Image: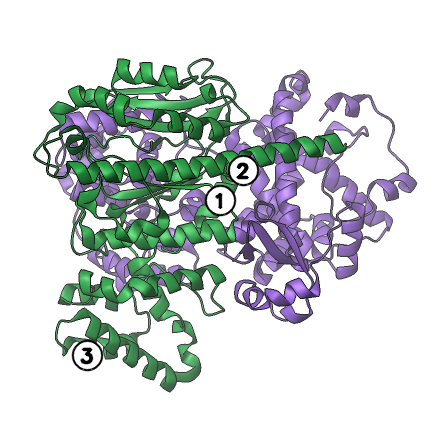
Chain colours: A green, B purple
Amino acid sequence: MVGLYDESMLPEMLPIYYTRLFPQSIFCRWLSCGSSPQPLSNRELSFTLADDVYLRYLSICNQKELQLLLQKKCPHKLDIGAVYNTKPSIGRHDAVVLSRELVFDIDLTDYDEVRTCCQEAKVCEKCWKFMVIACEIIDKTLKEDFGFQSILWVFSGRRGIHCWVSDYEARTLDSPGRGAVADYLCLIMGGDNQNKKVHLGSDNLHTSIRRALAVIDKYFDQLLEDQEFLSSAERLDKMLKMIPDEALRSQVQKTLESMPENSLLRWKMFLSVYESYCRESGNNARKIRYLVEEIKIQFCYPRLDVNVTKGFNHLLKSPFSIHPKTGKVSVVFKPGNAKNMKLDEIPSIYSLLDDSAPDNAQHEANMRVAVKNFQEVVFSLEKAEAMRRRNDANMSLDF
Amino acid sequence: MDLNIRRKSTKVQLSGSLVETYPHDLQMYKIPPTENITLQEFETLALERVTLLRCLATATTLKGLRMYSEEWTEYVIGELKTQGLKYYAKLCEKTSCATTEADLQARRKDHIAHFILRLAYCRTEELRRWFIARELELFKMRFATMRSDAVETFFKINNLCYTNISDDEKSEIMHHLRESTPHSNIDNMKFYKVKFYEVLDLVKMRKVYLSGGYAYIAHKDFISVLSAQYRTQLKQSLAVASHHLGEIEQDERLVSLLKGLHQSYSGDDYSNAKAMIPIESLDSLSVKSFPLCMRQLHEQLRLAHHLKHGGRLQYGLFLKGIGVTLEDSLKFWRDEFTKIMELDKFEKQYAYNVRYNYGKEGSKKNYSPFSCLKIINNTVGPGDCHGCPYKHCDVSILKNRLQGYGFEYQAINEIMDMTKKGHFQIACSKYFDAVHHSDMGLGINHPNQYFEESQKIAKGDIKVEIKKEAKPSVKKEINDFDAMDFEEIM
């Protein structure tokens, strides 16, 4: 349990954690494979020490150096950057970024305008479902549409998830390429001055959007109940503002306001009002052809921090780093298993290192699973890399 | 590219070889020109092409036309004709592969002018970006107006051969193609399989079916493949050109022309302030002299004591441009942010950003404030308040805000009218007139330009002809004391 422990214990606990529990060897294999054809030493690591002292442009050549560096600096947080043409600690000024995993960062704070259970840094089982949906949709898109395979999913340590794509094509994708992938995935657009943030037009829906909607539909009713999107007058008003057609809006408003404050019932009613309205107005309804889908997407679709994905050298928290505020480990999880994850079962440094903690046994078991998940991704990445190199060699022999 | 070649090389070529050099209206500009030209022609060609590129930018921003739409193309071609650039109009209107003398001369000028501008626009990252964006628009527009026989010739000339997917493969993914490709008549189209990164613009817009890393494109989507290749090639050659700038600049006759070329059009980039603005006056200035995009950021900051990253960047650089010093800037942001956070947190997480904007951190570049074009095209996400209010606000919210400011009914209607039509910068100009009770109809393309124009009025450099019907009905939000204070400092 978090809260019983505090940050001041970290300096004592971290060295033990890094030596005994942090999967150093597999971590180095993952990084060096993701750095190839450059050596591991060209990869930037960055440490956050106590009191937010920030060390950038660190690098390691092998596991031994990693262990030494971790012991010497005892970082409270560990971030991973890009792969440069030289060792990042030397020649910083003419260093060129050569590759970098394609990364995605989804944070629950970006859901503050829709989630009703928590705000800001808080997170609970109810709003975790947003992450489950995000993970499933993004994972499918990356695999099915872009053909990526080496995808690592990591809990960010507090209120979000990270995704690392290590396929060669993803690692070497240039900035416009990253931007295009991010935009392809981004359906919710607009700032605080725009109430309706999703516009799907009136033509056919793209295959990827249909697939995303199928995912959302699996969880939508549950989310409606959990989040009570339509219960209070204020929440209802938010939803009404997403309806561009005035006549329909006032019809919906009249009908729903007279109903009990049950979101699921109100939603069902909205659907039937919408359908009959569309039937009656025939061709005029073309503009609101996908209104239901648009509302669902605005409520549930992944909200990416696109700048993290678009940037080539954005630092991102490493897997198995400790979150300094919560003490939780950034565990690697399987995308298919996201829905079974319980937030208080995610291992924390405190319970891992304290035999007498009530969660100790379970957290240890979950830590082992997380390391195993990590290994699986790294093994498949190594296999893919070996294949790629063999193919490249064959190609050059042909000429 | 090697400039020496041009200086040394032979006389004007005969039309016979022009036919070989320029077989097609549309070029990929792979080989630099090698003939001798007079300085005068050099200058004329350069200026004419800048005019051409500028037409493209105007069509999109000031006229608010949708890129590559019929009206957009029509406007550009019309504008080229009125500007006396008939040869460009011809090249853009009906792109073909005819071989009359006029055709060949037009292509020759197009070719030389493109390469001159490369020299002028390779200097900075920002110039490069502007140039590449415009040249790509031009390329795409010309490709779009091409007749189908000319398209085929173009593919042949440039050695572009692709094989289409088999009918079996196509019928297997048919329903996905229908869902995900915006063309009608898909049944009769041939489809081609390319890697997704060859057609990023289609990926970005979700206008192509993707599977396993491949994009399935129709024949007419090849413009995406081509323009992506063209973009890469252009980017590389600009980088190469910038490395050889030293050699080119030994010829003083060219230096001033090349350097001044973009300035002559775009004017100032506002990265260096001309005046000093004390932060105490920002509240009153935000009402009197800020464009709405900055006024709303200022108000949001005062209200929430926080702005997200995009807002800090847009507003922070604007402030730098109008003349707020680094020290003042730090104080200004600190005073607000520390109302909701510890000083320590501000210094660690936000002060860096402020100094960065002033070129004191990181790559130490003196960043220039955002232009309208950049602000309009910026991504604005949940929690953000930046962007262009005429583009990134719901109509009802914008209207409420304007009413809250106390503008006249008529003025609000004019602004809303332009907003709804998507003419964002004209809406901004209407807002300017509403604030200043003027009827100037300024062409606004930079928030800092807006500010300077407004200051000219405030200082009496420009006399405003007050519109007859206009009563000074803007609510007296401005504290007279504040305003007086400011006038004295100026």
Residue under label 3: A254
Type of amino acid under label 3: Lys
Residue at mark 1 to residue at mark 2: CA–CA distance:
9 Å
Subunit of label 2 = A
Is mark 1 in CB contact (under 8 Å) with mark 2? yes
Residue at mark 1 to residue at mark 3: CA–CA distance:
50 Å
Up the image or down, B92 lies above or below B316; here it is below
Relative to residue A30, is residue B15 drawn left or right? right
Image disc number at residue A149: 1
Type of amino acid under label 1: Gln
Relative to residue A368, is residue A262 drawn left or right? left
Question: Residue B85, can we see it?
Answer: yes
Relative to residue B242, is residue B23 drawn left or right? right
Query: Residue A233: x, y in percent?
Result: 14, 67
Please name whichever residue, B206 or B106, is drawn nearer the observer in this view of the structure: B206
- For the residues beneath circles 1 and 2, the answer to whether they share a chain is yes
Q: Earlier in the sequence, mark 1 or mark 2?
A: 1
Q: Earlier in the sequence, mark 3 or mark 2?
A: 3
Q: Give SS at disc 2.
A: helix
- For the residues beneath circles 3 and 2, the answer to whether they share a chain is yes
Mark 2 closeness class: few <14, some 14–19, many ≥20 residues within 10 Å? some
Residue under label 2: A384
